[in-house]
Image (cartoon, helix red, strand yellow):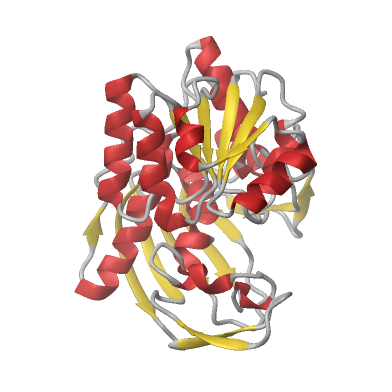
Amino acid sequence: MNIGIVGCGNISGVYLENLLRFDGVEVVACADLDAERAREKAARYGIPVACGVEELLDNPEVDLVLNLTPPRAHAAISLAALEAGKHVYSEKPLAVDPADGRRILSLAKQKNLRVGCAPDTFFGAGLSTCRRLLREGAIGRPVGAAAFMMSRGPERWHPNPDFFYEKGGGPMFDMGPYYLTALAILLGPVRRVTGSASISFPEREAIGPGDRPRRFSVHVPTHVAGVLDFASGAVGTIITSFDVWSSTLPHIEIYGEKGTLVVPDPNRFDGVIRLRGKDDRNWREIPAEGPYRENSRGVGLADMVRAIRENRPHRASGELALHVLDIMHELHQSSRSGTHREIGSGSVFAWEGEDDPLP
């Protein structure tokens, strides 16, 4: 399947490196609002065509659009690609507004096209092994979970950090998808949330590479705490923050009737897994098993291409991404309204067949 990439910024490099090694996919065009950036990426990775966005969408050689634009542009580009008759795989989040996410899935269904969305780190050996352990009853029935993403924010390392603090950004929309996708894959859908959120500092200072120190305004909450009521009955907590200098909290822990499972960083494909059962005197380190231990971003796209060919569901689905988008949106809404918020999506988002072949 021929891939056209829209958005040639920071994240595009790892996608391009990985897509070169997957069978059945070929990158034939790339586009960016910065034409020079598109030409540079095309030259570096041997992409035949560097062009404008409209030209790429009109290109009959492009079968699938990989949408790597900033979050606020995700919905517009994905809808335009679907209107042009092309499958879409998007960076997270699926959209900024859940209504746009639903429009994307509705249009795809109408046109018999596929929608996929990052993150795809749950293909990695770390989260795959944790999913297997839970299925096998390693800690019994899960009763609770806790997830923590504690950081001082991307302005210390990103060359253009402003968009992280605009609508569609913030720690929940930027990093929350990794944690919430992992929790959904491990524990199933969420039915209700409660959240509290704040803008701790209305201005930040950009000090990343190539940036003279400068101050910019913050438009989204930068510290978000929430409670997640899973349909299974488990109760989870989550904190995502760009306001923390350092922390010793784990990434994710799952608490079961027979023990506790420590889950590795969901922003990575590998990592340390620890388990302690009710009769264990000490923690046990569990080896991660399976492929995709290195940074394999793009494996979700490769799986979608293979699933189209094999006429089966793909794993990093639009439905899963919409469920995560709903959770993030309603956590913010809960903080504003001071009420519990029901999550309507999530009844169907998982793939069928644990043994479906990996790309």
Residue 337 left/right relative to 288:
left
Q: Position of residue 102 (x, y in %)?
A: 28, 41
Q: In the rendered image, is residue 141 in sight?
A: no
Q: Position of residue 305 (x, y in %)?
A: 56, 22
User: Which residue shows up at 63% across the image and 44% down it?
Assistant: 121
User: Which residue shows up at 54% across the image and 82% down it?
Assistant: 243
Q: Nearer the viewer, residue 29 or 93?
A: 29
Image quarter (top left, top right, bottom left or bottom right) of the C terminus: top right
User: Which residue shows up at 35% across the image and 19% down it?
Assistant: 112
Residue 274 left/right relative to 164:
right
Q: Nearer the viewer, residue 342 or 253?
A: 342
Q: Position of residue 66 (x, y in %)?
A: 54, 37
Vertical relation: 359 (above or below) 249? above
Vertical relation: 74 (above or below) 357? below
Tell me which corner region of the image, top left, top right, bottom left or bottom right, holds residue 330: bottom left
Q: Position of residue 4 (x, y in %)?
A: 57, 32
